[in-house]
Amino acid sequence: MNTMESILKYLALQFAGQSIHSHFETDLKRFDKYSISASQLFFDYSKQNLNVEVISTLVAWAGECQLSEQTNSMYSGVKINNTEKRAVLHTVLRAPANIQKQVLGEKLADEVAQTDARMIELVTALHAGELTGFTGKAFSDVIAIGIGGSYYGPKVCDEALKPYRQASVRVHYLANVDGITVTNKLQGLDPETTLVVVVSKTFVTQETMLNALAVKQWLLESGCSEGDLLGHFIAVTAASGIAEDFGIAKRNILPMWDWVGGRFSLWSAVGFPLACDIGMENFKLLREGAYEMDCHFVDAPFSENIPVLLALIGIWNRSFLGYESLAVLPYDHSLRYLPGYLQQLDMESNGKRVDINGEVLKLAAAPIVFGQEGTNGQHAFMQMMHQSHTTIPTEFLVPMQGHSKYTEHHKVLVANCFAQSEALMQGKTLQQAFQELIDGGMADDEAKALAPHKVMSGNVPSSTITFDKLTPKVMGSLMALYEHKIFVQGVMWNLNSFDQWGVELGKQLGSAVLSVFEGGDDSKLSASSQGLIKRFMDSE
Ligand code: F6P
């Protein structure tokens, strides 16, 4: 443990018993001091359990961890994903052309530009009704098949940017390997007018391939010939050979590159289904917003840097104050897919047990991320957040203006958001609970019995991110904010945020179980799994 970590451990012991609310009583300017604006976002972290000393120690530690140097390494293409020997260059995809050339070199930058040009061509033709299916009718629907990083980013942005959707086409997503999702998706679609986009970096992901085959079969059964299939499929992949073997025309394959990780790939052609929905101009605005955040991240001093502060506060809560979870609560219905996206981004990236050298981590990394849109979450899990023994740090997100004409609804939504962060912090003492009941006219004995049930420990730390309106640019900025948060935390914990070896064992055993279904050997499986397999096979 280095000196900074020891100081932070010592500070955490002091802060564990402190009341966040009292920080406001001793510092009337706390809100101004612990909030910043950048890249169209406003970040209020005044309700966190920390002070200037904590922040400056975290910032100094970030300096010792060479955060700036590591950021430069990432931005310039050093292979910081050491276990897969890959560069991590998603940021370059949203940078201006001259930077792309500088970082990628002429040839790769050209490939990126050509991919963009092809996306524009396809999206324009699609919206103009010039892309047609096997009976000559224009495509009215796009079904995007992909999972994990090849799904979450476009899906979360697509829902968030509903007001920017183009009327000429509807986009649907198919991710899970569950027959009912295929049935449900295809039910509302006309095979003659459905364009299929298969998004898979590897083009071997079991779920995606099975879904792609099912949709191919649906087209064939609907009268589409093998030859006409070529016009119905587009692939986004780094494995063009496998996509061609699947039957996708070369001209319809949009490339991905090994220097862009799956869960960071929204900015590549993985965003193509989203671009089909919101149009290429809006997709570019999304990238612009992200680039604005990239510049802020690189240029602003750590103590005035939203992604750095968000990351450092997360580490303070997780590794030093010992809080195991993080609730992400967007008070914006259109951001309801954000918690799911962040679960992958955070937990698949930083849910690790060893550092980049394979040594077991000394500090706990990656919180358990969960969440739901407000106010729905208030009527579900927030009871626990207010009254259980578990303290769950929270990130609230809320737009100052909504997109709908129901301004009263928006007022109520915002009021609930602000009220929740206040309630989580303030809590309610036994004395307050008792007094409230007495003031309400309850008898003394009854009030004494009921009051303990109304106590809320409070002191739950939270941050609130606000923005004017959820536009494509703001959304881009938000997505980049979280990407950088995860990167910074990975640097501080000294782990590789860009691999995901933990997913592999499940995949291997998944194949092993499947082979048992086909009569293979089950002797290496436990009696429990053997029993479960038998139950399944007996039911067939
Ligand atoms: O969840 C594991 C994972 O490998 C992710 O990292 C990736 O985003 C996802 O599967 C899908 O992979 P692919 O794009 O290759 O289909």
Image (cartoon, rainbow, N blue to C red):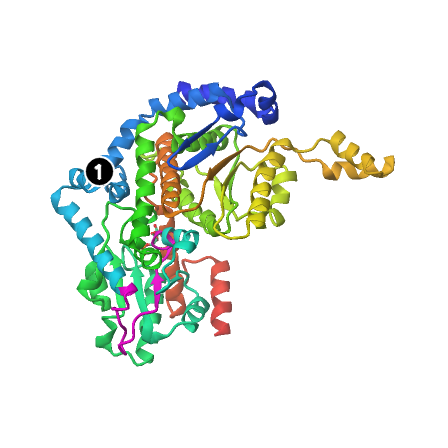
Amino acid type of the residue tagged 1 in the rendering: Gly
Residue on which disc 1 sits: 77
Compare residues 53 and 352 and report the one nearer the observer: 53
Q: Residue 58 lies in magenta, yes or no? A: no
> Residue 399, image x and y in percent?
48, 43
Eyeballing the image, is 419 above or below 61?
Answer: below
Eyeballing the image, is 207 above or below 291?
Answer: below
Q: Quadrant of the N terminus?
A: top left
Taking 104 as reference, is 209 left or right? right
Compare residues 312 and 442 and report the one nearer the observer: 442
Compare residues 462 and 362 and report the one nearer the observer: 462
Name the residue furthest left.
Answer: 106
Seen at 15% across and 48% down, the residue is 110
Eyeballing the image, is 504 above or below 33?
Answer: below
Quadrant in the rendering for residue 310:
top left
The stretch in magenta equals 126-152
> Residue 535, image x and y in percent?
51, 68
Q: Is residue 361 visible?
A: no
Q: Is residue 332 visible?
A: yes
Compare residues 380 and 505 and report the one nearer the observer: 380
Seen at 47% across and 71% down, the residue is 537
Q: Secondary structure at mark 1?
A: loop
> Residue 415, image x and y in percent?
59, 41
Q: Residue 132 lies in magenta, yes or no? A: yes
Name the residue furthest bottom.
Answer: 223
> Residue 82, image x and y in percent?
26, 38
Mark 1, residues whose alpha carbon is within 10 Å: few (<14), some, or many (≥20)?
Answer: some
